[in-house]
């Protein structure tokens, strides 16, 4: 078959034989899936997505390799200040408290955050985490739904995050012997917690340890969850602590496999006096606040993983376009095309699920967990495929694909391992599915 005949049979040429309506019904525009999906977003969402992509390419990309390989020497503060100044740390609420576009926010409280999380993570999973972990830290102040906590703490901190001098936050639930246990109902019932709050005159004395806290060393304030003395997880209460409080110190900082620019640190609490005004939400509401935060943030983690998958795909595509194997470019081999198509299909499906999970104003536990599991597994599979297609080039540390593989593995673990997220889906969905999907009833 000649090249001319092939071109004639392709849809753009073939549709010329149709009438005007038929041509109109046949969409042949050469849009990338990024562009195609963009068309489904509102104006405000498109604006933040585009801005985040530009920021990621101009500001994150140039430092991404260095921030991963020499993360002990990398100072993230200039980048974080720049991000805050451009509004990327204040999308958890609309003006005057934040910068989220109002109408899309009323449709989905988390979509705009998810969109920027994807864009940042295309260039660096670790810097993406560093930026987005701030949201995890500040979210309990809002999602407690407790007006005094919102007015006293969330509003000023979120407004400060619009300036180039943000107060960075972290979120601390994990303890040395309680990881999954504090992310899952059944685990929670058996959790062995050590971080305890004891009532004193005008507040609370906190003692204990939190571990693996993203940005724990960098953050200035942390939302810490503690049980009340003599009680169990059902008494969990959220406290806003300041790193300057007496008795707060940073212990071990983990040496991580991936997402290295963001520290994962131990936070040690020794007789830390926390005034009553720093109790977030009501006493004993900590477990519910924690679950609420995770049900929102797991969609965002899914979006970040999707960004990592996209980064791997884009780098592989560029490599296959630029690299010759024998007489032709890699991309001209059909088996390479099939692999690339498979990667693209997976990340497109992941985006559909992530965006679906962000589809309503309020979070949905099952949808958020499904998106987190699928997108993080996709990031791992697509990154692995990227290394395979790029061979030795994929294995070296200077082109981002090897880093992407390391970064992707972590996304399957934090915010509840993917097993725990499957259990979260079952917890919410099972009864409804079993009751309503009966056959022959
Ligand atoms: C780099 C990094 C950053 C992190 N950042 C934060 C942070 O900012 N704040 C914070 O509070 N925490 C953070 N974490 C903690 C993280 O959320 C936990 O590591 C995670 O929830 C898993 O807990 P675990 O490590 O204790 O694993 P474990 O609970 O010990 O699980 C071990 C294995 O058992 C499986 N498992 C456990 N229970 C079940 C079950 N019921 N059914 C089936 N399988 C099960 C798990 O899936 C896993 O495979 C971070 C962790 C890492 C590694």
Image: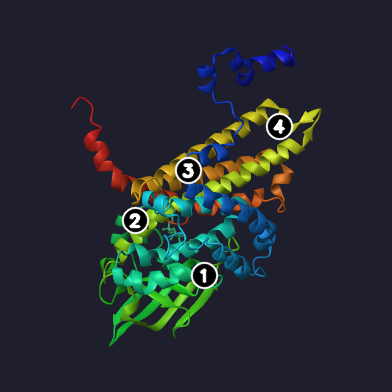
Which one is nearer the viewer's eye here, 29 or 231?
Answer: 29
Coordinates of residue 200 in the picture (x, y in percent): 29, 86
Q: Nearer the viewer, mark 1 or mark 4?
A: 4
Question: Can I make out residue 226 in this image?
Answer: no
Instruction: Give the residue at mark 3.
Output: 41
| Label 1 crowd (10 A; few <14 / some 14-19 / many >=20) | many
| Quadrant in which the N terminus appears | top right
Is 379 rendered above or below residue 190?
A: above
Which one is nearer the viewer's eye here, 208 or 118?
Answer: 118
Q: CA distance from mark 3 to mark 1?
A: 37 Å
Instruction: Give the residue at mark 2.
Output: 184
Instruction: Give the residue at mark 1.
Output: 265
| Label 3 crowd (10 A; few <14 / some 14-19 / many >=20) | some
Point out which mark residue 331 bears. 4
Coordinates of residue 234 in the picture (x, y in percent): 26, 66
**Across the whole image, how many numbered discs are drawn on residues?**
4
Q: CA distance from mark 1 to mark 2?
A: 22 Å
Which one is nearer the viewer's eye here, 88 or 141?
Answer: 88
The answer as to whether callout 2 falls within 8 Å of ligand 1 is yes
Q: Nearer the viewer, mark 2 or mark 3?
A: 3
Q: CA distance from mark 1 to mark 4?
A: 43 Å
Is 355 rendered above or below residue 411?
A: above
Q: Nearer the viewer, mark 2 or mark 4?
A: 4
Name the residue: 37% across, 48% down.
107
Left or right of 425, for residue 248: right
Q: Earlier in the sequence, mark 3 or mark 1?
A: 3
């Amino acid at each position: 078959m000649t090249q001319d005949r092939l071109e004639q049979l392709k849809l753009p040429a073939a549709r010329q034989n149709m009438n005007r309506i038929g041509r109109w019904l046949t969409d042949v525009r050469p849009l990338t899936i990024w562009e195609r999906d963009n068309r489904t977003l509102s104006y405000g969402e498109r604006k933040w997505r585009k801005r985040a992509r530009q920021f990621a390419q101009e500001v994150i990309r140039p430092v991404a390799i260095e921030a991963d390989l020499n993360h002990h020497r990398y100072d993230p503060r200039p980048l974080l200040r720049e991000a805050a100044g451009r509004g990327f740390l204040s999308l958890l609420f609309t003006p005057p408290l934040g910068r989220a576009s109002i109408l899309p926010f009323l449709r989905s409280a988390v979509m705009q955050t998810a969109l920027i999380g994807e864009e940042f993570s295309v260039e660096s999973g670790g810097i993406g985490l560093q930026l987005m972990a701030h949201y995890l830290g500040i979210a309990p102040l809002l999602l407690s739904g407790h007006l005094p906590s919102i007015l006293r703490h969330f509003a000023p901190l979120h407004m400060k995050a619009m300036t180039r001098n943000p107060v960075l936050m972290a979120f601390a639930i994990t303890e040395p012997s309680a990881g999954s246990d504090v992310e899952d109902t059944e685990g929670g019932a058996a959790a062995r917690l050590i971080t305890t709050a004891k009532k004193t005159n005008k507040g609370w004395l906190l003692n204990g340890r939190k571990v693996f806290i993203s940005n724990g060393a960098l953050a200035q304030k942390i939302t810490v969850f503690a049980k009340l003395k003599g009680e169990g997880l059902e008494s969990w209460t959220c406290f806003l602590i300041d790193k300057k409080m007496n008795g707060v110190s940073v212990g071990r900082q983990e040496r991580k496999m991936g997402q290295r620019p963001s520290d994962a640190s131990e936070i040690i609490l020794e007789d830390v006096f926390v005034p009553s005004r720093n109790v977030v939400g009501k006493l004993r509401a900590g477990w519910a606040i924690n679950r609420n935060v995770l049900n929102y943030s797991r969609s965002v983690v899914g979006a970040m993983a999707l960004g990592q998958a996209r980064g791997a795909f884009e780098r592989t595509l560029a490599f296959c376009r630029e690299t010759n194997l024998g007489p032709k470019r890699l991309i001209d081999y059909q088996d390479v095309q099939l692999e690339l198509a498979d990667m693209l299909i997976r990340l497109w499906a992941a985006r559909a699920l992530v965006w679906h999970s962000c589809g309503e104003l309020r979070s949905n536990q099952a949808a958020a967990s499904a998106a987190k599991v699928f997108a993080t597994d996709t990031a791992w599979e697509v990154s692995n495929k990227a290394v395979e297609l790029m061979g030795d080039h994929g294995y070296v540390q200077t082109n981002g694909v090897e880093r992407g593989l390391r970064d992707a593995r972590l996304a399957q673990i934090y915010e509840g391992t993917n097993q725990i997220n499957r259990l979260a889906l079952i917890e919410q969905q099972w009864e409804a599915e079993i009751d309503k999907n009966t056959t022959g009833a």
